[in-house]
Structure formats: structure tokens, C-alpha cells
Image (spheres, rainbow, N blue to C red):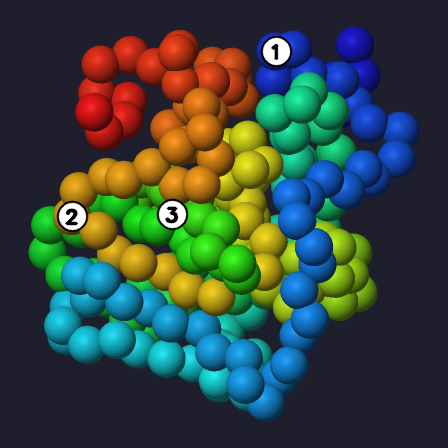
Amino acid sequence: MSEEESRLPPGQHISRGRPVIHYGRVPSFRPQTWRFQVFGATASGQVHEFAWEQFSGLPTTTLIADFHCVTKFSIMGNEWAGVPASALLEQVPPAPGVRHVMIWAEYGFSANLRMSDFARETTLFATELDEKPLSPERGYPVRIVVPHLYAWKSVKWVRGIEYMTEDRRGFWEERGYHNIADPWEEQRYSYQEEPGDGPP
């Protein structure tokens, strides 16, 4: 078994290329009007908004991580660069009692995360892949990358974060995907959920 194969979650295979999967059309990026919001249960009680220049000026980091699609292919050793989730948590702290986050994207797409998943040091708002800006179909200008979960949680074209004290299901979770999405546990579909894995 190769080193890459040893990193594969159960049921996955290593992709020979870099497939791109998305639902709906690819949105246009207009830097003059683009805004990123952090809202919901913020510590200040206020909505915080970042223009593109402000978001681009946040601290950045680089991450090398594998990428596991629920359709069973994995892309190994991707080099992502962007704003770590920790930087946004520091800029806009959540209120006490926040345990979940909703990631909002263009066209109303969303994915919910436990705060423990969002706050991991490997969670990143990526603007680059392999030292190049993201291509539009891969989420340009910003996608979240949550490499320890199935890739539908790594939402493309992100426009905001909602801090939540109670869990809610996102776009794909409402359509039958697992609320947590741990590839090592093969948490693909909602019928696999155990009590406590998601909201009623």
C-alpha cells in the first residue's frame, strides 16, 4: 500500500485527474460589489461585512490536504492558500453559546458545520489552489475548505458565515446528506445518522 493509499478513507479511490462537480451555473465575480458577511450570534450582536479589499487583507496561510468527495473519489495532496477560519473567529468572535456555523454561498447554497469542525486549524477560506487563483468552476474567488469532512461541506463561492446556537441543516443536508459528513465513518446519507448527529 502506498503512502497516499494509507490516507484514503473507506470506500474512496484516488482520482486520476481533478474532477469538478457543482450544482447550477458558475457565478460571476464583481469585486466592486462583492461582500462577505459574518452575522447571526456574533459577540457584538452586529453584522460584520468585508469588502473584497478588506477580505483580501486578512491573514493568510497555506495548507496541504486531501479532498474526499462523497461520490467516492479523492484528490490527494492539494495545496490550498487563503484565510484560516481562525482569523475570522478572531476578527468577529461568536457569542457565548454558539455551537454551529452555517456557511452561505452564492444562490443561497449553504452547508452547516459544528463549531468544533469550523474552528479546526485546517479549515480555510481558500483563494488559491496549487499557487494559482481558484478557477471559477472551483469556487473563485473564495471557497471554504474543510478537508477532514466530505467535500460538499467545502462550499464554493462563499459569501458569509452565520453563527448559530442551534443546528440547522444546509442545502445538501436538507436533501438527504449526512449532517456531520465524516469520511472515515462513511457518513454519507442522513438515514445513517445516529441520535444526536443532527437536528430533528
Q: Residue at x 48, y 35 (%)?
A: 172
Q: Residue at x 40, y 10 (%)?
A: 192
Mark sitting earlier along the chain (2/1): 1
**Which SS class for mark 1?**
loop
Q: Which residue is situated farthest in the right direction here?
A: 16
Residue beneath disc 2 = 165
Q: In the rendered image, which quarter contains the N terminus?
A: top right
Residue beneath disc 1 = 10
Mark sitting earlier along the chain (2/3): 3
Q: Nearer the viewer, mark 2 or mark 1?
A: 2
Give residue 101's position: percent from left, percent from top.
31, 49
Which amino acid type is shown beneath numbered disc 3? Phe
Q: Is residue 164 above or below residue 188?
A: below
Residue beneath disc 3 = 118
Q: Nearer the viewer, mark 2 or mark 3?
A: 2
- Mark 3–mark 1 Cα distance, whole angstroms, equals 23 Å
Left or right placement of residue 10 versus residue 184 in this view: right
Mark sitting earlier along the chain (3/1): 1
Using the rendered view, name the quadrant where residue 154 is placed. top right
Q: Is residue 64 visible?
A: no
Q: Is residue 114 above or below residue 134?
A: above
**Which SS class for mark 3?**
helix
Q: Residue at x 69, y 71 (%)?
A: 28
Left or right placement of residue 154 versus residue 134 in this view: left
- Mark 2–mark 1 Cα distance, whole angstroms, equals 32 Å
Left or right placement of residue 26 versus residue 63 in this view: right
Using the rendered view, name the quadrant where residue 143 is placed. bottom right
Q: Is residue 30 above or below residue 200?
A: below
